[in-house]
C-alpha cells in the first residue's frame, strides 16, 4: 500500500494546495474587482485607481439600481420570469426526453421526432415570424412573451434523453413487472436518478432566463414590463436616463459609466452565484452507481 504520510506526498499536497489556491484566487479576482468598482466613486473608477478595494467608498451605484421603483419592478419581473419559465421548461424537457430516449422497438418514430427537434436548433423561422406569432397570440407586454417562445430548450432535451438512455434498462423492466406504467416509471425512477442532469439543465435554464434582455425589448412596449436585464441595458448601456428624476441629479454626479456597469454586472451575477452552490453537488454525484446488481 502507498505511504500517504511520506515526505514526497506531503510536499506534493502542499504544492497542490498552493496551486489550487492560486487558481481560485485568479477566478475570484475579476468578481472582487467588479465589486470594488461598484462601491467606488465615479471619479476614482474613471481614473483607474480601483483594483481590489473600493476607493472613496459609496453606494451610489446600488442606490441607482435599487433605489427606484422602476428597478425593483424590473427585478421582480425577472424573478417571475425565472420561476415560471424554469418550471415550464423543466416539465417540458422531462416529458419530452423520456419517450425520445426509448429504442425504436418501443417508439417506432423516435429517430424521426429526434431529428425534428434537432432541425429547430439548426434552422428557425426568423425574428419577424416569431414576433408576428407572439403578437397574434396576444402575448405582447405579458410575462408569457418572455416564457413561452423558448419553453422547449432542445439542447437540454438532448442532454436529458442521452442521460436517460444511459440508465440501466433493468430498472424500467423491474418497474414494469411491478405493474408501473410509463408515467409512474418516469416520475418515480427516471426523475430521481436524473438529478445531476436535471440540475445541469435547470441551471442552464435559470441562467438563460436571467441573462436574457433582447426579447424584453422585442416583446415589451412599455418599460414597466421590462425584465431586469432589459431595463439595465436600456438605462445603462444606452445611457437612456429618461427614468431618472430631476431630484436625483446629485446621485448621478457620483456615478460614472464604469461604476454603473460594475453594479449592473454584479446585480446580474449575484443570484446565479447564490443558486450555483446548491446545484453543484449534483454535478459530481454518481447517483446511478450501484443501483443495479450484476
Image (cartoon, helix red, strand yellow):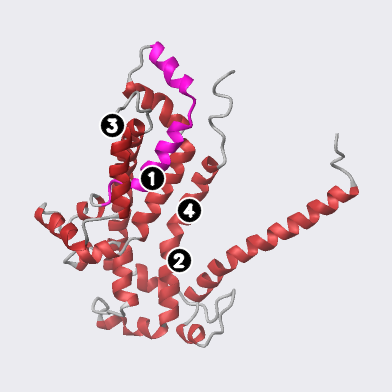
Asked if the residue at tag 3 contacts the one at tag 4, i.e. Cβ–Cβ closer than 8 Å, the answer is no
Q: Viewed as shown, does residue 84 lie left or right of 294?
A: left
Secondary structure under the numbered disc 4 in the rendered image: helix
Crowding at dot 2, Cα within 10 Å, few <14 / some 14-19 / many 20+, comes out as some
Q: Nearer the viewer, residue 124 or 167?
A: 124
Q: Is residue 169 magenta?
A: yes
The residue positioned 58% from the left and 77% from the top of the image is: 51
Q: Viewed as shown, does residue 47 lie left or right of 243?
A: right
Q: Is residue 187 magenta?
A: no
Look at mark 1 in the image and give the residue it sits on.
156
Is residue 119 something one can see in this rendering? yes
Q: Nearer the viewer, mark 1 or mark 4?
A: 1
Look at mark 4 in the image and give the residue it sits on.
274
As drawn, the label of residue 266 is 2
Q: Nearer the viewer, mark 2 or mark 1?
A: 1
Crowding at dot 4, Cα within 10 Å, few <14 / some 14-19 / many 20+, comes out as few
Q: CA distance from mark 2 to mark 3?
A: 47 Å
Amino acid at each position: 500500500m502507498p505511504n500517504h504520510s511520506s515526505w514526497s506526498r506531503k510536499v506534493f499536497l502542499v504544492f497542490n494546495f498552493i496551486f489550487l489556491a492560486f487558481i481560485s484566487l485568479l477566478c475570484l479576482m475579476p468578481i472582487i474587482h467588479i465589486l470594488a468598482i461598484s462601491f467606488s466613486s465615479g471619479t476614482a473608477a474613471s481614473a483607474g485607481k480601483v483594483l481590489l478595494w473600493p476607493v472613496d467608498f459609496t453606494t451610489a451605484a446600488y442606490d441607482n439600481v435599487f433605489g427606484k421603483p422602476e428597478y425593483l419592478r424590473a427585478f421582480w419581473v425577472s424573478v417571475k420570469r425565472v420561476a415560471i419559465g424554469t418550471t415550464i421548461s423543466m416539465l417540458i424537457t422531462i416529458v419530452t426526453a423520456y419517450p425520445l430516449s426509448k429504442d425504436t422497438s418501443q417508439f417506432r418514430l423516435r429517430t424521426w421526432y429526434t431529428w425534428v427537434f434537432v432541425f429547430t436548433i439548426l434552422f428557425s423561422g426568423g425574428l419577424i415570424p416569431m414576433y408576428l406569432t407572439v403578437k397574434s397570440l396576444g402575448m405582447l407586454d405579458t410575462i408569457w412573451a418572455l416564457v413561452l417562445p423558448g419553453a422547449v430548450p432542445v439542447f437540454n432535451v438532448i442532454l436529458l434523453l442521452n442521460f436517460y438512455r444511459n440508465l440501466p434498462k433493468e430498472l424500467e423492466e423491474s418497474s414494469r413487472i411491478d405493474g408501473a406504467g410509463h408515467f409512474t416509471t418516469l416520475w418515480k425512477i427516471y426523475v430521481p436518478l436524473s438529478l445531476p442532469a436535471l440540475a445541469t439543465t435547470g441551471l442552464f435554464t435559470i441562467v438563460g432566463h436571467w441573462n436574457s434582455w433582447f426579447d424584453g425589448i422585442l416583446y415589451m412596449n412599455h418599460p414597466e414590463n421590462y425584465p431586469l436585464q432589459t431595463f439595465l441595458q436600456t438605462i445603462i448601456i444606452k445611457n437612456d436616463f429618461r427614468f431618472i428624476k430631476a431630484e436625483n441629479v446629485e446621485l448621478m454626479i457620483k456615478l460614472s459609466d464604469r461604476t454603473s456597469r460594475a453594479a449592473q454586472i454584479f446585480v446580474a451575477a449575484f443570484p446565479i452565484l447564490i443558486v450555483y452552490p446548491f446545484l453543484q453537488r449534483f454535478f459530481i454525484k454518481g447517483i446511478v452507481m450501484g443501483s443495479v446488481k450484476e
